């Protein structure tokens, strides 16, 4: 009789699992790779994410973090994510635009007007309805939200930038994608592709004249040690998307997926708060390090960059202009 009762209990449990379609949770390992440097908020956010996932899944999902480009370079991590060699990575819109050309719109100069504008679009219904499905269906990766990288500024070795004309002929490092390189041209510079891991040495030796990144990146990567000037241009309100390989995502149970999404939200909130606070204090820090911070006319930069965008019909012909107008109407 006892054996029959035990058998019936097991059968009832299995029937419930089959009925819900829920898989029994198994131990899962997620490899999370990034080229972000130690101490940077979106590096620290990876560990916030890992801890939160472990907490919410009772340890059934373990996130292993590889930062500082220790596993894949900036040029290789996207391919690694798509192929499944890496399970998770931060992906930018210009990188996505190499495969989905219309996405160059989201990384173009002066597309977003502020942090609030950016996050309301990229963490709201527009992203859920118009961005994430394309990424999921075209590339086989699952976006988990958008994280604030900061407002990109021009950082130079020995040329002070007080106007758009001062950018002419400036050999400026940009990430190696068509969208990034065009942005360098739109800013009036002479862009050259270079891996982030090689940038400090290139600035130090004069192989490039300058680079563009948010102020927290300039600090954490110590570019202030090998440059003299920062121009506050705010030419891109920049973001990155924590993404997971779709096959890996589909292998998770529903509860594990829910935990990963919740952990990603916590990581995004941690990063964005830290990033905004850091940006607010860094100008004084750089000036204390002997750097000169200039404030060229942003209207002049915006007009020239947007004119360059409009003239690049090969790029803008791929854009969804109805969506473009909808996003711009949300600017405050």
Image: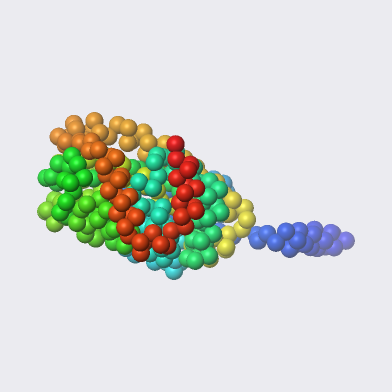
Q: Is residue 12 left or right of residue 199?
A: right
Q: Work out whether residue 263 can be spotted.
A: no
Exactly how many numbered labels are in the figure?
A: 0
* Residue that extends furthest to the right in the rendered view of this protein: 1
Residue positioned 82% across, 61% down in the render: 8
Q: Quadrant of the C terminus?
A: top left
> On screen, 251 above or below 67?
below
Q: Is residue 118 left or right of residue 137?
A: left
> On screen, 108 above or below 268?
below
> On screen, 114 above or below 240?
above
Q: How far across and how far down the image is residue 157, in percent?
A: 14, 46
Residue positioned 13% across, 56% down in the render: 207
Q: How far across and how far down the image is residue 247, in percent?
A: 53, 66
Q: How far across and how far down the image is residue 105, in percent?
A: 40, 55
Q: Is residue 260 left or right of residue 220?
A: right
Residue positioned 84% across, 59% down in the render: 5
> On screen, 93 above or below 213?
below
Q: Is residue 232 left or right of residue 117?
A: left
Q: Which residue is nearer to you in this view: 144 or 66?
A: 144
Q: How far across and how far down the image is residue 79, in percent?
A: 39, 66
Colouring scheme applied when the structure was drawn: rainbow
Q: Quadrant of the N terminus?
A: bottom right
Q: Work out whether residue 327 can be spotted.
A: yes
Q: Which residue is nearer to you in this view: 105 or 61?
A: 105
* Residue 19 image-quadrant placement: bottom right
Q: Which residue is nearer to you in this view: 248 or 297?
A: 297
Residue positioned 23% across, 45% down in the render: 154
């Amino acid at each position: 009789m006892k054996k029959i009762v035990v058998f019936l209990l097991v059968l009832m449990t299995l029937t419930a699992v089959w009925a819900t379609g829920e898989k029994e949770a198994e131990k899962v390992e997620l490899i999370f790779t990034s080229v972000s440097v130690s101490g940077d908020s979106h590096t620290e956010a990876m560990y916030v994410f890992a801890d939160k996932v472990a907490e919410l899944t009772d340890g059934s999902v373990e996130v292993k973090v590889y930062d500082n480009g220790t596993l894949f370079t900036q040029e290789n991590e996207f391919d690694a994510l798509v192929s499944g060699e890496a399970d998770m990575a931060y992906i930018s819109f210009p990188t996505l635009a190499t495969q989905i050309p219309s996405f160059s719109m989201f990384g173009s100069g002066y597309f977003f007007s502020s942090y609030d504008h950016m996050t309301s679009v990229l963490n709201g219904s527009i992203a859920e309805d118009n961005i994430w499905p394309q990424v999921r269906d075209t590339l086989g990766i699952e976006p988990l939200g958008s994280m604030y990288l900061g407002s990109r500024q021009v950082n130079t070795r020995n040329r002070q930038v007080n106007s758009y004309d001062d950018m002419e002929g400036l050999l400026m490092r940009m990430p190696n994608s068509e969208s990034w390189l065009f942005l360098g041209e739109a800013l009036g510079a002479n862009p050259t592709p270079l891996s982030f891991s090689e940038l400090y040495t290139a600035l130090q030796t004069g192989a490039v004249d300058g680079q563009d990144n948010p102020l927290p990146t300039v600090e954490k990567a110590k570019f202030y040690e090998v440059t003299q000037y920062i121009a506050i241009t705010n030419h891109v309100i920049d973001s990155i998307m924590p993404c997971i390989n779709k096959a890996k995502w589909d292998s998770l149970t529903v509860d594990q997926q829910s935990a990963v999404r919740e952990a990603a939200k916590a990581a995004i909130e941690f990063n964005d708060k830290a990033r905004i606070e850091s940006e607010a204090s860094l100008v004084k820090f750089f000036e204390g390090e002997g750097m000169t911070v200039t404030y060229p006319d942003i209207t002049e930069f915006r007009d020239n960059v947007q004119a360059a965008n409009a003239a690049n019909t090969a790029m803008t012909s791929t854009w969804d202009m109805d969506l473009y107008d909808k996003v711009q109407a949300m600017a405050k």
